[in-house]
Image: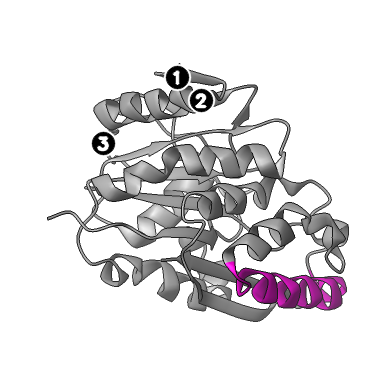
Amino acid sequence: MTQTMPTYFISHGGGPWPWLPAMRAALQPLEVSLARMPAELAQRPRAVLMISGHWERDAYTVMTSARPPMVYDYYNFPPETYEITYPAPGAPEIAAHTAELIARAGLPVAEDGEQGFDHGTFVPMALMYPQADMPLFQVSMRHSYDPAEHMALGRALAPLRDEGVLIVGSGLSYHNLRQFGPQARVPSAAFDHWLTEALALAPADRTQAIANWEQAPHARDCHAREDHLVPLFTALGAAEAAPATRVYHQTGIFGGVTASSWRFG
């Protein structure tokens, strides 16, 4: 019997960090949290659906390739990090069903048979399922970043949870590339505290608080562009009534950043 899967919003770290010894050491608590995710599940998923902060389109676009390629969407890293492979199979049949669910909800949808795994997807998956034997596909964000629209996407995807699909929103609870270091200490801690309290609210109040995230302390200091926060909206929308559990929390990253991840359900 298939049990209802939780959803996650994870902070996925920076660039190809698990392949860089200094960064991997700095993010060791994140590695531990990602590696233990499969053990937190009541059963092995049929597939993982990732909504990454690194893929956005005009319409919600579903990756349909049976063998997705790699997308090295990071810059100024060592040459060997552009040769990383994560050869997980796609999930074309589940992807087609996912596109139908999105269309049925009246949301704009498209399919893409050529899109590959970006680093917001293959980096955490390499730690979650290092054997690359878990079927994996992505659904894009929309350029609008609108919280209500992306929560609606989550609601459209919610039936997949009862079909053995693990939905993961992959971003960062703090993402300001110009302020990674000591200057991030105060804003990232304040926003993380707000986010922790907001996600502990009753479901209706929680949805409203997250939809109005720009009112949070230091919101725009932490997310000048909210591309890395948007995956939270979808993970939450897909498990709107489920309790939130913080599954990763780290302070002082790169000299100042506070970051967290959550499970819903």
Residue type, mark 3 in image = Pro
Q: Quadrant of residue 85?
A: top left
Between disc 1 and disc 3, the foreground one is: 1
The mark closer to the camera, 2 or 3, is 2
Secondary structure of the residue carrying tag 1 is strand
Q: Main secondary structure of the magenta part?
A: helix
Report whether 39 appears left or right of 265.
left
* Res 31 quadrant in image: bottom left
Q: What is the three-letter code of the residue carrying label 2?
A: Thr
Q: Is residue 208 magenta?
A: no
Residue 223 lies, in percent from the top left, at 79, 55
Residue appearing at x 68%, y 76% in the figure? 197
Q: Measured from the top left, where is residue 133 in percent x and y?
A: 21, 47
Q: Which residue is mark 3?
A: 89
Whole-Å distance between the Cαs marked 1 and 3? Answer: 15 Å
Is residue 186 within the magenta segment? yes
